[in-house]
Amino acid sequence: MDKEFEHSQHSQTFHPLQSQDTLRAQSEPYRALPTYTAGYVYSSEMLLHSSLHGHPEQPERISRIRKAIQEARLLSKMKQIPIRPVYRDEALLVHTQEHWDKVLAIQAMSEQDIIDSESYYESLSLYVMNGTTRAARLSCGGVIEASLKVAQGHLQKALAIVRPPGHHAEPDEHMGFCFFNNVAVAAKVVQVQTSIKRILILDCFTPVDHSVVYNHVAKVQVWASCSSGVHPSNTNHVLSVSAGFDAAEGDDLGECHVTPTGYAHMTYMLSSLASGKLVVALEGGYNLDSISNSVLAVTRVLLGDAPPELPPMVASEAGL
């Protein structure tokens, strides 16, 4: 046998420590891991908070949003950020110990306790069940993790697909569908754990301006516009949008008419602040079609798409 051929045969025999898969992998071209500029948080555990009698703040709000983003083939373009519950010490940066104890006690309520307390919680525009505590803690913890990933520079933008919402919760009280003030707690955690101290919180998507509530609840420095402190190119600033989609066209609670294109343009304009470091946290929005289409439009902008062209606008008689 030719010696060169014999050597060639010997060189192609498998090494005892090398599997066929390993050799195949070595022969394939190197594929770099995907790089992400945007991420999202989501957990099906937040669906556990559900009213027995039906309620506008329903679990399908977030499941429909996630489905819309997935069907548009955008979910794979975003990094999924691991979600976890808010810790006690984090919540106490904004809320009182009594408030923390009150929300945690919900998970231990019996079926009869829940029935007996219905009128009390209805007076606060709330409903509760055993899964409420877990969902509320995950909702707040999800916004914290999304905010930290942006503040620490791991991502440029993040979307928190979370519920229950948070922007109506006060330091010592849960109310208005909300248990923890998610964005306010996240802002305080970012200030404590990172070098970022200036955080602009905007609640600009809802028909009611809650900026005064945030200023009181979070004790976070809040600016109303870029001229008062948030510079477009400053990398030490973060913009957190408390995104209530109840202003969307078709939402009976909001009774406003903001289209998905309108939300896309607002997101695009806000992206010019704080070097584009943007966290969008879901708050209100109760028409399932409206909220899904609107968040999808926002997601496209977070991923770098330009918003669609706005149609010509004509002032209505009501606006004159």
Image: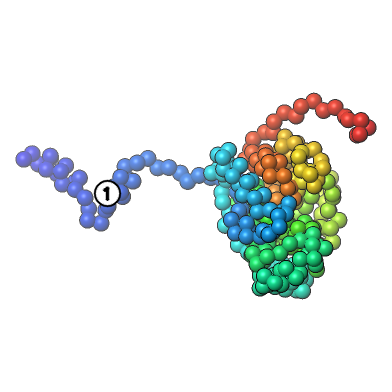
Q: Is residue 129 above or below residue 143?
A: below
In the picture, the quarter occupied by the N terminus is top left
Residue sitting at x 29%, y 47%: 23
Q: Can residue 261 be seen at all in this image of the molecule? A: yes
Residue 273's x, y, as percent?
74, 44
Residue 217's x, y, as percent?
81, 62
In the picture, the quarter occupied by the C terminus is top right
The picture quadrant where one finds residue 97 is bottom right
Residue 190's x, y, as percent?
70, 60
Horizontal placement of 13 versus 305: left or right?
left
Horizontal placement of 211 versus 33: left or right?
right
Residue sitting at x 8%, y 39%: 2
Residue sitting at x 43%, y 42%: 31
Q: Around disc 1, counting alpha carbons within 10 Å, would you say few (fewer than 14), some (14 to 19), or many (20 or more)?
A: few
Horizontal placement of 218 versus 138: left or right?
right
Report which residue position mark 1 lands on. 20
- Mark count: 1
The picture quadrant where one finds residue 147 is bottom right
The picture quadrant where one finds residue 213 is bottom right
Q: How is the image coloured?
A: rainbow
Say which amino acid is labelled 1. Gln
Q: Secondary structure at mark 1?
A: helix
Q: Residue at the right extreme?
A: 320
Q: Can residue 143 be seen at all in this image of the molecule? A: no
Residue sitting at x 26%, y 53%: 18
Q: Is residue 139 above or below residue 250?
A: below
Depth check: give the residue in front, 137 or 145: 137
Q: Is residue 297 above or below residue 220?
A: above
Residue 85's x, y, as percent?
63, 64
